[in-house]
Amino acid sequence: MMGAGDAFGFFVAKLGAKVSAFFSAVPYILGYIGRTFLSSFAFVKREKAARKILIMQLLFTFIEALPIVVILSVSLGSAIFLVGYELLLSLGQSSMIYQILLVVVVRELGPLLVAFVVTARSATAIATELGGMVTSHQVESYISVGVDPIDYLVAPRFLGVTLSVFFLGLYFSLCGIVGPAVVAKFVNPTIANGYFTGLLKHLSLMMIATSVIKSIVFGMVISITATYYGFNVERASTEIPVAGIQAVSKSFVGIIVADVIITIIPSLL
């Protein structure tokens, strides 16, 4: 039976192996990211087949996710405005609801929720699709005929997911600040008066820029992580579900880390 000391030693050994494996993979990961960026910049020169993949990615990630995002944004914005307004009114600070609504919907929670929705839907799909192509030797077939998998398989998915998160973020922000005004008209028309005036008074360029930057960075994180773990599948088909799980979990971690960094940077300037 393993003692406490042995268990601790085993844990330390496993942790050390994980850390060592991560740092040994850093050069490859950085090279993969750089190669993806370079291939994406030259995407306009690609053939129709690659552009078709981009369109299909936009259809799945953006168009099909749009109803979910709209419902989430309207529900969140309306709940924050209606509940928060009554609470702040009792404290004599009702005008603060506009700033709170903009911070939560536009700058903070909006981009995160969109990224989580896209991760749950698309990261798994991309990783499992590419993993299946690896195990069925389709990727090797592309290489054998001189087709770069990064150019043909990664770049359109990278652009498709990044653009989708960007546009979904815009729709989330728009519906999240317009929706509460519509809902308030039916629930309590008196609090809807001066709604847009209050919003414009507290809306800033920095808030919009932060939201846009977060959406773009989150899209990059999701697409790069999903394609990376999809290509990490080796030969066994049993590795495909594992790749999907890793793509989702690592995307969540990357999104949270990126969100913290982007949020902190403006306060340091």
Image (cartoon, helix red, strand yellow):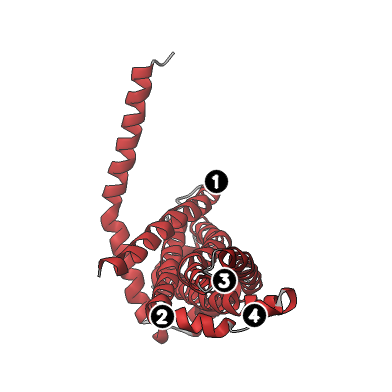
Res 80 quadrant in image: bottom right
Crowd tier of the residue under label 3, counting other residues whose Cα lies within 10 Å: few below 14, some 14–19, many 20 or above: many
Q: Which mark is residue 204?
A: 2
Crowd tier of the residue under label 4, counting other residues whose Cα lies within 10 Å: few below 14, some 14–19, many 20 or above: some
Tell me, yes or no, if residue 147 can be seen here: no
Q: Which residue is at the front of the view, 238 or 60?
A: 60
Res 251 quadrant in image: bottom left
**Residue in the picture at 47% in, 58% down:** 230
Count of labels shown? 4
Q: Is residue 128 above or below residue 101?
A: above
Amino acid residing under circle 1: Thr
* Real-space Cα separation, disc 1 to disc 2, in angstroms: 49 Å
Q: Earlier in the sequence, mark 1 or mark 2?
A: 2
Q: Which residue is mark 3?
A: 61
Crowd tier of the residue under label 1, counting other residues whose Cα lies within 10 Å: few below 14, some 14–19, many 20 or above: few
Give the percent coordinates (x, y) of residue 124: 55, 58
Q: Nearer the viewer's eye, disc 3 or disc 2?
A: 2
Q: Which residue is mark 1?
A: 238
Label 1 SS: loop
Amino acid residing under circle 2: Ser
